[in-house]
Amino acid sequence: MTELRMPKAGSATTATVTSWLVEEGDSVDAGQVVAEIESEKATLELEAPVGGRVQRLLAEPGVELPVGTVIAELETA
Amino acid sequence: MTAKEEVGAVSDESKLLRLYELMLRVRWFEERVAADFRDGRIPGIAHLSIGQEAVAAGVSANLRPDDYVATTHRGHGHLLAKGAPADALMAEIWGRATGVCGGKGGSMHIAHVASGGLGANSIVGAGQPFAAGVAMAIRQRGQDRLVASYFGDGAITSGAFHEGLTMARVFSLPLLYVAENNGYSETTGARFHLGTATIGERLAGYGMRSEEVDGMDAVAVSEAAADLCAYIRAEQAPALLECRTYRYHGHFEGDPMLYRTDAELAQWRERDPIPRLRQQLDAAGLGADADTMERAVAAEMDAAAAFAAQSPFPDPAQTLEGVLV
């Protein structure tokens, strides 16, 4: 299992998932963009670090969370 | 040109391996920083030099232990290549008490004076006046040392930068100016802010001896740095080494990089200095040595990250110690 954490952009200490681009159960490839993230410093795309199946999406879109918070879990081989 | 001629002044096997080791250490150190930064484990902000390692390696391979380096906001690699210990450097970036500055400097004010690393500087173009001051001190003390002063293409638009170069020129100080021309001043392309095709043209009025090299080729950087360092020591005059290079990551970690194309990044990655030197090592029959080195560097960086993660934060009671207030 691989945890995806709320990414830190620049000096921002919190960030928000604006939208998930995948659903639980979807298969994703390494490097695939899985979420759009917004923080005070930048808007960015979160990529899956490895390929796998999306097990759980833990961040509610629109909710501001501390960077480093686990926001999704990928089931990896 | 044969492979041997190409290697030229650094045909010596140990020097090729040394360049490879320096680049690997910088690359893998910074890849650890990138991963831990993204996960929110590192405070503040970080600017990484991933892609630019041939410059730090090629320059540092020609500096003596008692020479100095003065660097920029993108300076971890310069200090590491000059000889700062990876573990205490990493701990500093993590803001930990075991860091080279007790955790109070962080990424952009990191320094390790014992190895000649005078420090990073968070202000673009602000390093040159103080590098000139250190070179002036060398002169007044009659020492045989030089200062390598790194800057990016963006620094040239700053007034303080020119004050530093003016001092170096007028007093003919022992300074190696290392221009890391990575094509971007933060998010602005050099074609919009430089005004000339090269940094050398822009700084021609300072009348310095200058060399322009492929900054994605550690051997080329090292050869040019060797020539210029010998010149500076012999003539006691400043010189400019311009390295055309590229950073693979953003201006800062988390930079969405909307100002450049994926195709541009891919073109530069094809010229990556590390596999390029690895091929030369393999061709020279040094592949096994390179493998051993890779394992050692990987272990060193794992240990550095673990050391930083396990180290305590500075004691709040000591907030005002070791800082100027």
Image (tube, helix red, strand yellow):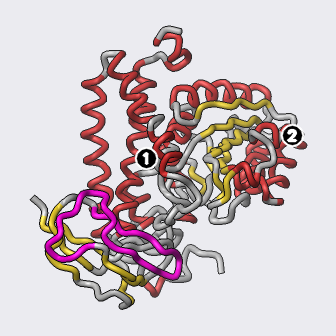
Residue in view at x 76 percent, y 54 percent: B193
Residue in view at x 43 percent, y 25 percent: B16
Q: Which residues are magenta?
A: A22-48
Q: Chain of mark 2?
A: B
Q: Chain of mark 1?
A: B
- Name the kind of residue labelled 2 in the image: Tyr
Q: Is residue B183 magenta?
A: no
Query: Is residue B245 shown above or below B90?
Result: above
Label 1 – label 2 distance at C-alpha: 32 Å
Task: Name which quarter of the figure residue B163 lies in.
Answer: bottom right
Q: Is residue A26 magenta?
A: yes
Q: Quick one: label 1 or label 2, which is nearer the N terminus?
A: 1
Q: Position of residue A26 (x, y in %)?
A: 17, 69
- Name the kind of residue labelled 1 in the image: Val
Query: Is residue B241 shown above or below B305?
Result: above
User: For this view, does B216 lie left or right of residue B87?
Assistant: right
Q: Position of residue B151 (x, y in %)?
A: 67, 50
Give the labeled residue for mark 2: B206
Q: Of all residues shown, which one is farthest toward the left?
A: A77
Q: Of all residues shown, which one is farthest toward the bottom?
A: A63
Question: Quick check: can you spot residue B294?
Answer: yes
Image disc number at residue B26: 1
Residue in view at x 24 percent, y 58 percent: A29
User: For this view, does A77 lie left or right of residue B5?
Assistant: left
Q: Are marks 1 and 2 on the same chain?
A: yes
Asked if marks 1 and 2 touch (Cβ < 8 Å), the reply is no
Q: Secondary structure at mark 2?
A: helix
Question: Quick check: can you spot residue B64?
Answer: no
Q: Residues within 10 Å of mark 1 (few under 14, many from 20)?
A: many
Q: Secondary structure at mark 1?
A: helix
